[in-house]
Image (cartoon, grey):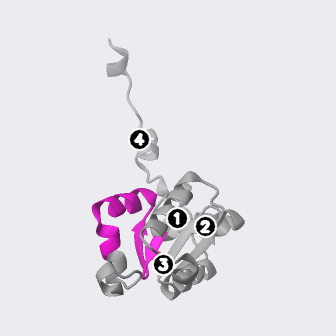
């Protein structure tokens, strides 16, 4: 008799493996933090949750997000609100739950979640980021400046 044929799992054992795992690892945003995130994201044209600051990014992905936005012509002090998640552990975890996106940096434009640096880079390369920024009046096109 084969070992595999002889083994049987009890219903108790099977139910433990079929149980949803989200309850074991769920994170929950406090009401105050959700309200704070809602207000910050809606009050600013562009919001960047990053590690470090635009002048001193603390990771390569955050640096790349800043550089992409600068290449696009986005004025950081005026148009972009940045939040250093390294200064606030609750913010660092809550923003991941809020957006349902596991990594930082995270970019919001006009209250809408855009994505992380990978999405931002793809949009930059395809021209979609420029279109989005122009459409939302974050930047102007060369023709509009004349």
| Sequence-first disc among 4 and 1 | 4
In the rendered structure, the answer to whether residue 127 lies left or right of residue 65 reads left
Q: Observer-nearest residue: 132 or 92? A: 132
Taking the image as shown, residue 15 lies to the left or right of residue 56, namely left
The secondary element bearing badge 2 is classed as loop
- How many dots with numbers? 4
Contact, mark 2 vs mark 1 (Cβ under 8 Å): yes
In the picture, the disc for residue 131 is none
* Residue 1 vertical placement versus 123 (above, below): above
Q: Please state the horizontal and vertical placement of residue 88, each as a whole percent of the image.
A: 69, 68
Tell me, yes or no, whether the two marked residues, 2 and 4, touch with CB atoms within 8 Å: no
- Mark earlier in primary sequence (3, 1): 3
Query: For mark 4, does the 10 Å Cα neighbourhood hold few (<14), some (14 to 19), or many (20 or more) residues?
Result: few
Give the numbered dot on residue 66.
1
67 in relation to 136, above or below? above
* Disc nearer the start of the sequence (2/3): 3
- Judging by the rendered image, the residue that carries numbered circle 2 is 54
Q: Nearer the viewer, mark 3 or mark 1?
A: 1
The residue that mark 3 highlights is 46
Q: Residue at x 61, y 76 (%)?
A: 30
- Residue at mark 4: 14
User: Would you call the spot at circle 1 few (<14 residues within 10 Å), some (14-19), or many (20 or more)?
Assistant: many
> Horizontal and vertical percent for residue 75?
51, 78
Closer to viewer: mark 3 or mark 4: 3
Secondary structure category for the residue under label 3 = strand
| In the foreground, 99 or 53 | 53
Q: Residues within 10 Å of mark 3 (few under 14, many from 20)?
A: many
Q: Where the N terminus falls, by quadrant?
A: top left
Which quarter of the rendered picture does the C terminus lie within? bottom left
Of badges 2 and 3, nearer the viewer stands: 2
Q: Which residues are magenta?
A: 107-131
């Amino acid at each position: 008799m084969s070992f595999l044929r002889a083994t049987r799992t009890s219903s108790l054992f099977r139910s433990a493996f079929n149980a949803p795992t989200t309850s074991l690892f769920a994170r929950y945003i406090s009401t105050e933090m959700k309200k704070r995130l809602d207000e910050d994201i809606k009050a600013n044209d562009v919001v960047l949750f990053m590690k470090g600051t635009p002048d001193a990014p603390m990771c390569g992905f955050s640096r790349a997000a800043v550089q992409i936005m600068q290449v696009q012509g986005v004025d950081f002090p005026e148009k972009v609100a940045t939040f250093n998640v390294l200064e606030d552990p609750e913010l660092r975890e809550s923003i991941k739950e809020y957006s349902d996106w596991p990594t930082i940096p995270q970019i919001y434009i006009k209250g809408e979640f855009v994505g992380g640096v990978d999405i931002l880079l793809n949009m930059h390369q395809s021209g979609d980021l420029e279109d989005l920024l122009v459409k939302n009046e974050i930047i102007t096109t060369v023709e509009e400046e004349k």
